[in-house]
Amino acid sequence: MSLMPRLQLATRMNWVLTAAMLALITIGILFIYSATYAREDGPSHSLYQRQILWAVAGMGAYVFFAVTDYRRLRKLTWAGYGIGLVLLVLVLVLGTKIDGARRWLYVGPIGIQPSEIAKMAVIFVLARRLSQPGENLGRIRPLLEVLALVALPFLLIMREPDLGSALVLLPVTLAMMFAAGVPYRVIGVLVMTGVAMVALVLAILFLPQAIHMTEAHQQKIMKAVGLSAYHRNRLTVFFNADKDPLGAGWNKRQSEIAVGSGGLHGKGYLKGTQNMLGFLPRSVSYTDFIFSVVAEEKGFMGSITILGLFGVVLSCGIHAAIRAADKLGRLLCAGIVTMLFIHVFINTAMTVGLMPITGIPLPLLSYGGTFMMIVMSALGMVQSVYIRSQRAGLSFEQGVLWRAA
């Protein structure tokens, strides 16, 4: 396709989605600067400047995927999935070890987080597998194939270990199975199995004596399910905040103080004391705890504004899924929207103390090049689905029946 037709396609984009995305990126850059403004070595200009560069590169990826027909990417699905698996294996062998985990591959000064790439690879391979025409998704074989496609990257990510990123794959898979028309009873069985496994892990962690388990067996099972001592401490602190307030519980407590002290309108930009004085650790304030920085400096109103912008982005993704011209586009949007929602929900919930602390970044706001590129590429694919649905001439009412298709 030549340049002019591609530009004409760009005019069909959902500009509300684009505006909300750019607003979130701008807010993120401003507060990454704020989170690093009072470092002992002075403002860390390189971080927010790097984020600007990643945003510019991400915008190029966003436009590229928006004007590229997502159906043409179908033939690259298995190659992308294979690359994702190879990167997950390489990070276990060659990755840089930080805080006991190998999550990053470095190519010179550029860090790559394979787990983020794997998330998008899984979404695309599931969209292709679940959209095959004439497939009876109530049968055992296709369901086992789908679960196997998810299990392999899930287990590799758990080996890093990166519990948060691995767990994101589970609701994404369930949402895509639902959107594909998998029978409710099958989804119900999978959900109940997951709930039972979580309950068992919590019982092993907190009630070893009640279930007659020795400490040695407890440690062995925790290691088998991928829970390191670090993860166990985080879970323990979540249920008992006073157990280790100066250690594993420090980030949680300081984040809650930062969010609560912001009040209605906040303390003002670059005036958040929890952030500026370093009580909210500066090593994570611009990544996993960027929402805490915003809440302290802009208060409840700033927090609601951010959540409202995310609501716009997610609503546009749902709208694109409903109007999708085919099942592939519908499932692609469903997977991307679910991934973004889980990230937003877990990240904001952990900063206010409603969930255990996990290394889940906030899309478009948290510092990080790999995740920024993946999220903006994914939103570009949502735009591609939206553009092609317009060309197909589908009405909203016709799209509402998408799950029955």
Image (cartoon, grey):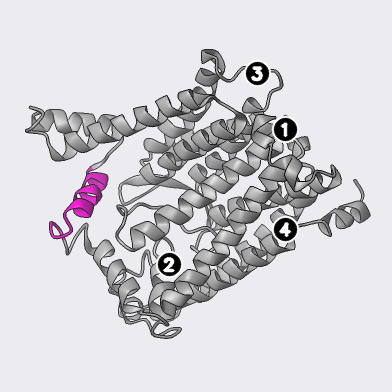
Looking at the rendering, the stretch of residues picked out in magenta corresponds to 229-244
In the image, taking residue 320 as reference, residue 171 lies left or right, namely: left
- The residue that mark 2 highlights is 291
Q: Is residue 44 visible?
A: no
Which amino acid, by three-letter code, is at mark 1?
Answer: Arg
Q: Tell me the CA gap for discs 1 and 4.
A: 21 Å
- The residue that mark 1 highlights is 74
Q: Tell me the CA gap for discs 4 and 2.
A: 26 Å
Which amino acid, by three-letter code, is at mark 4?
Answer: Gly
* Residue count near mark 4 (Cα–Cα under 10 Å), binned few <14, some 14–19, many ≥20: some
Residue nearest the viewer, comparing 329 with 360:
329
* 183 is higher (above) or lower (below) than 251: above
Question: CB under 8 Å between callouts 1 and 2?
Answer: no
- The residue that mark 4 highlights is 60
* 373 is higher (above) or lower (below) than 83: below
Residue nearest the viewer, comparing 14 with 123:
14
- The residue that mark 3 highlights is 135
Residue at x-position 28% and y-position 63%: 251
- Give the foreground label among 4 and 2: 2
